[in-house]
Amino acid sequence: EKGVHAGKLLSRAARTLGGGGGGKPGFAQGQGKDAARVEEALEEAGRELEERLGR
């Protein structure tokens, strides 16, 4: 069974925004300073999910 740790996923995306994040396997939160890069952060999160889920 494959899974994704929400804290690790969010941390990677939040760094794209110049911020940080983290949390537990099932729940995470984060923040960033560069709102103009939200689309890029979402794409980063999508790539991370694909890598983790083997797609």
Image (cartoon, rainbow, N blue to C red):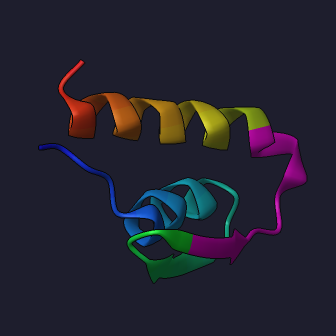
Q: Residue at the front extreme? A: 1
Q: Residue at the right extreme? A: 35
Q: Residue at the top extreme? A: 55
Residue drawn at point x = 87 percent, y = 43 percent: 36
Residue drawn at point x = 44 percent, y = 57 percent: 9
Q: Quadrant of the C terminus?
A: top left
Looking at the image, residue 17 sits to the left or right of residue 26; the answer is: right
Residue 27 spot, x, y in % from top left: 55, 72
Residue 53 spot, x, y in % from top left: 24, 33
Observer-nearest of 48 and 33: 48
Looking at the image, residue 27 sits to the left or right of residue 53; the answer is: right
Residue 16 spot, x, y in % from top left: 60, 54
Observer-nearest of 3 and 7: 3
Q: Quadrant of the N terminus?
A: top left
Residue drawn at point x = 25 percent, y = 50 percent: 3
Q: Is residue 53 above or below residue 25?
A: above
Residue 13 spot, x, y in % from top left: 56, 54
Q: How many marks?
A: 0
Looking at the image, residue 55 sits to the left or right of residue 44; the answer is: left
Q: Residue at the left extreme? A: 1
Residue 35 lies within the magenta run: yes
Q: Is residue 53 above or below residue 55?
A: below
Looking at the image, residue 14 sits to the left or right of residue 46; the answer is: right
Observer-nearest of 19 and 47: 47
Q: Is residue 51 above or below residue 5?
A: above
Residue 37 lies within the magenta run: yes
Residue drawn at point x = 58 percent, y = 76 percent: 21
Q: Quadrant of residue 51?
A: top left
Residue range in magenta is 28-38
